[in-house]
Image (cartoon, helix red, strand yellow):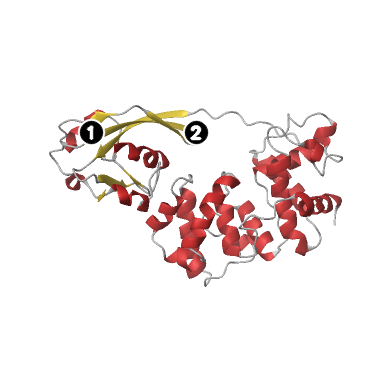
Amino acid sequence: MNQFAEKLINWQRQHGRHNLPWQTSDPYRVWLSEIMLQQTQVATVLEYYPKFINRFPDVQSLAEAEQDAVLQLWAGLGYYSRARNLHKAAQQIVYEFGGQFPQQRIELERLCGVGRSTAAAIAAFAFRQPETILDGNVKRVLCRIFALDGDTSDKKFEAQLWQLAESLLPKNQNDMPVYTQGLMDLGATVCKRSKPDCTHCPMVSDCLAWAQNRVAELPRKKSAVPIKHIAFYWLILRRDDGAIWLQKRPQKGIWAGLYCVPCLENLQEIESFGLDDWQEYAVLTHRLTHRLLEITPLLATHFFRQPEDLGSGVWVQPQNWHEYGLPKPLAQFLPQIVL
């Protein structure tokens, strides 16, 4: 075992995280957690993961579920393509792999929504395969310890990091779960993006960035992506009994596959609904990765045309809103208009 792996394994056993609910060799639970943890904080996943496991305890139940049921449980977790890919991948496992998770990284990469690093994590945790992960946290750890200066999004530089990460793997395959968890823990709890806790890092004596006083400099920060502002209206149609009209969003675009009130680009589109009047609420803002949504809610209770005439949808009573996968900002706003 090389020194890097040995130090990391010893540190993880003493100081790492050991009580996360997905720390198991069950490939289904490992896979589910890895998908949920993509660009999402552990604290947030800890809220969603138990509910998901309770509803879909195995890959068979997930594969047999309706997409709406999956999206309903995912609502609020964001990056909804993950949920759609999760559902598709479950069906792949059941129908293409006979209900058994493939054990090799290359085979795992065939699953929808599973890239090289996620496949490596599943292979390492569930099957003790000698595969390395390389997520954002690991890239940061490697760039600092080995003082590697480059753009982590550059394919050539990333290939260099993959090669380095593979060279550091422990020789004993049985150590793969604790080693992989150690990489995750080190990046998440010690070698953090800001305010890293270098004095408690097991690698501080070997860290070139620390020796060269370049910890804050490495890895190089990416150029900020311009934020695109998107303005639109929510048309909230409410019947006398309190039910609101929901439509299923297209499978592509913002909130794909979720249920939402009609989203209009301009007020001229309201004419098709034959509204007598409406109540306008203050603009809501909701930040997506590189987009800022500016939403103006419009509440209408009197309309000459029924929305059923304008397209498919469903009237939903307030007590049943939780049964539908709603965009987070809509779920937060709707209680304001309950009769």
In the picture, the quarter occupied by the C terminus is top left
Q: Earlier in the sequence, mark 1 or mark 2?
A: 1
Q: Amino acid at mark 1?
A: Glu
Residue 166 in the image: x percent, y percent? Answer: 75, 52
Q: Residue drawn 65% across and 58% down?
A: 23
Circle 1 — which element?
A: helix
Q: Which residue is mark 2?
A: 290
Give the number of marks.
2
Residue 105 in the image: x percent, y percent? Answer: 64, 60
Mark 2 neighbour density, 10 Å: few (under 14) some (14–19) many (20 or more): few
Picture layout, residue 11 above or below residue 153: below
Circle 2 — which element?
A: loop
Residue furthest front as drawn = 339
Q: Amino acid at mark 2?
A: His
Identify the image quadrant of residue 153. top right
Identify the image quadrant of residue 41. top right
Query: Does the CB distance between marks 1 and 2 fall below 8 Å?
Result: no
Residue nearest the observer in this picture, 194 or 156: 194
Residue 51 in the image: x percent, y percent? Answer: 49, 56
Residue 59 in the image: x percent, y percent? Answer: 51, 65
Q: Which residue is mark 1?
A: 269
Residue nearest the observer in this picture, 147 or 22: 22
Q: Quick check: 225 left or right of 256? A: right
Picture layout, residue 300 above or below residue 34: above
Residue 147 visible within the image:
no
Residue furthest bottom as drawn = 98
Q: Residue drawn 60% across and 47% down?
A: 42
Q: Residue drawn 63% across and 59% down?
A: 122
Residue 282 visible within the image:
yes
Question: How far apart in space, not on screen, are marks 1 and 2 (Cα)?
Answer: 27 Å
Mark 1 neighbour density, 10 Å: few (under 14) some (14–19) many (20 or more): few
In the picture, the quarter occupied by the N terminus is bottom right
